[in-house]
Amino acid sequence: MDAIRTLTSTAAPLPLPNIDTDQIIPKQFLKRIERTGYGDFLFYDWRRIQDGPNAGQPNPEFVLNKPEHKGAKILIAEKNFGCGSSREHAAWAIQQFGFSAVIAPSFADIFFSNAGKNGIILVRLTDEQVQTLLSRSTANPNHTITIDLEQQTVKDDQGLHAHFDIDPFRKYCLLNGLDDIGLTLRHADALDSYEQKHDAAFWLAPKSDALVTATPETR
Amino acid sequence: MSQPQTLFEKVWQQHVVVEPEGEPTILYIDLHLVHEVTSPQAFDGLRMAGRKLRRPDRHIATVDHNVPTTSAQDRLVIADQISARQVNALRSNCAAFGIEFFDVQDASQGIVHMIGPELGATKPGTTIVCGDSHTSTHGAFGALAFGIGTSEVEHVMATQTLPQSKPKTFRINVEGKLPHGVTAKDIILEIIGRIGTDGATGYVVEYAGSAIRALSMEERMTICNMSIEAGARAGMIAADETTFAYLKGRRFAPKGAAWDEAVAHWRTMHTDEGAHFDREMTIDAAELAPNVTWGTSPGMVTRVDAMVPSIEDARSEADRKSFARALEYMDLKPGIRIEDIAVDRVFIGSCTNARISDLRAAAAVVKGHHVATSVRAMVVPGSQLVKKQAEEEGLDHIFRAAGFEWREPGCSMCLGMNPDILQPGERCASTSNRNFEGRQGRGGRTHLLSPAMAAAAAVTGHLTDIRKWPLAAKPAATEPALAQGGAR
Ligand code: SF4
């Protein structure tokens, strides 16, 4: 994944809490076996008119369809963003649509992890700060925000200056674009010796039938 | 005397491979469950990096999300080409990497969270993951079980571990006796309603108390299943005699002397007296009523004898906004009685409530009645084993005679990745776990409730308080007999 240090961009405001991964990418797009090509399906149902003669046409009211928000690399939403299903397709869709960061007061656990694996910066600010950014981006599509990952700050062109917390290891991985599996495999020796001992704990093995014939002494 | 520990801490500690300074803990994973939707990109990732599957014996795979439930034939040749491609990808990946795979017509096929317990692969004290958020279901056995994304699936495949930061702990005690007509589903809906859909974010929840201990394994699974709907990383219930009785004799359970030794270890896996939790809460079971969701998030829930809430009932500004949006989406007006809400569809299924005891409870309600003419209702058993058991008990006849469709096992209309979906504007009483906008089909409206309540709604054509039902007897809290329950 690509490393990002700072990001300066306009933002797309989505002033709703509890935006779930079913909304971020509806199920019909989870049938694909590829890892790419999800950007067009981001918020698929919200981006289209649902009823009436124009059903299926792009909904001009939805923020991602507004030309003035085109090219925004930052998405702003309310609390508990990404709740629901574990589908990593949600993170892929957000990234492939063109977002590099999401700002919200809180994120659901699995989405938080998935976003990290894909190098998306998730910034947790206070409710108040998020409301400020939401209203500024809504009022002025040119409202520009700078996220500095190294400094852990968010600033905008209207004087907001906020600090955000991030786990130091997650920050390190984002800054360096590291491969998680590679990081774990640095501990291959520890893993080998742990596994050897752990295998003896047959009551933790998913398939104990393989061990049925062994007596407790020989196991 | 060592420090008293919680159940979670014991499981965590026994699975720590290494705790690198300033980095997440590397946690060993005992069992990885695989299904067709979230695995293809992970297998591809392994291939691209030239990595091997570290421990094929610690993975079990099945197909559930995509498979049609109409007929055995429709499952063998899936008409939807994209679904077929995904199912075929899992078939060939399992063959290539040596993973045991329970294919569509296998006697052990079913929703991934049903077959783990049925096979006896889900065990107390273990760590279990799956690329699916409802992996929390397996916590009912005292396992630490949680959903992961596809990158993490690949990580587990390559290393049999996951880097994890330690969650906080939250104990929810449910004490006392449940009133007549109130089920495990109502307990968990109550909890989500009280703490909110992000109320347990960052926590592992342990469910404890006399009302929890009195539950059968199937009921415990219903509770742990929906932990994720409260935002929890995982939900857990300590293993006890009920757990051991359920597991004994199942295909992947230890046998003979090994069984006794296993049980001796499992008995140590409980929260010690005096152990510390970061948060704790107690609920009085006697106060509970059957619950129904009215909105578009599982936290938007109320008692069946209540009314659709008004926007003023919301607890915060953010909630007010989502209440307004939910009422509009659900086409409901504040103040109307929940029982006056008419439904078009009824879905009895999903990894929350499609086990044999759920089907028995629903069948007991519909027996001798007929589905209302305005309603289309279906029962989708969660697994082949449940379907077989139900058919042996004649439940399929009861459902069919009452006008229900009787289907093949799978996720079905829980998320509608297969052809089972709601049409725009249709309203459904559903025993599943999510009522998000469009979850069961674009524009569809979902009310979550217990199996008995779903059955009653099918008969009356509207949401119905099961406590008034003349025929609603609480089904015996027994487990399926062993011969039908997973041993081969
Ligand atoms: S039944 Fe529903 S919740 Fe359960 S695994 Fe299938 S889609 Fe997910």
Image: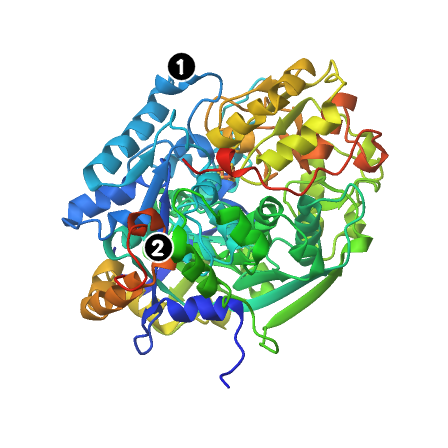
Callout 2, which amino acid? Ala
Who is closer to the viewer here, B371 or B252? B252
Please name the residue shown 56% across and 24% down the image: B392
Q: Position of residue B359 (x, y in %)?
A: 63, 31
Residue drawn at the location 52% of the way across and 75% of the way down: B5
Residue B234 position within the rendered picture, expressed as x and y whole percent measured from the top left: 51, 57
To which chain does the residue with label 1 belong? B
State the image quarter where residue B238 is shown.
bottom right
Q: Residue at x 25, y 42 (%)?
A: B43
Q: Which residue is mark 1?
A: B73
Report how far apart the C-alphas of labels 2 and 1 lie in the structure. 35 Å
Q: x, y percentage for residue A90? A: 42, 44
B108 versus A110 height, above or below: above
Q: How is the rendered protein coloured?
A: rainbow
Q: Is residue B41 left or right of residue B293?
A: left
Closer to the camera in the image, A44 or B117: B117
SS class of the residue under badge 2?
A: loop
Residue A132 visible in the snapshot: no
Which amino acid type is shown beneath numbered disc 1?
A: Gln
Please state the horizontal and vertical placement of residue A125, each as a whole percent of the image.
52, 66
Q: Which residue is mark 2?
A: A205
The residue shown at (57%, 19%) is B406
* Tag 2 and tag 1 share a subunit: no
Q: How many marks on residues? A: 2
Judge from the rendering whether residue B192 lies leftward or rightward of residue A167; answer left or right. Answer: right
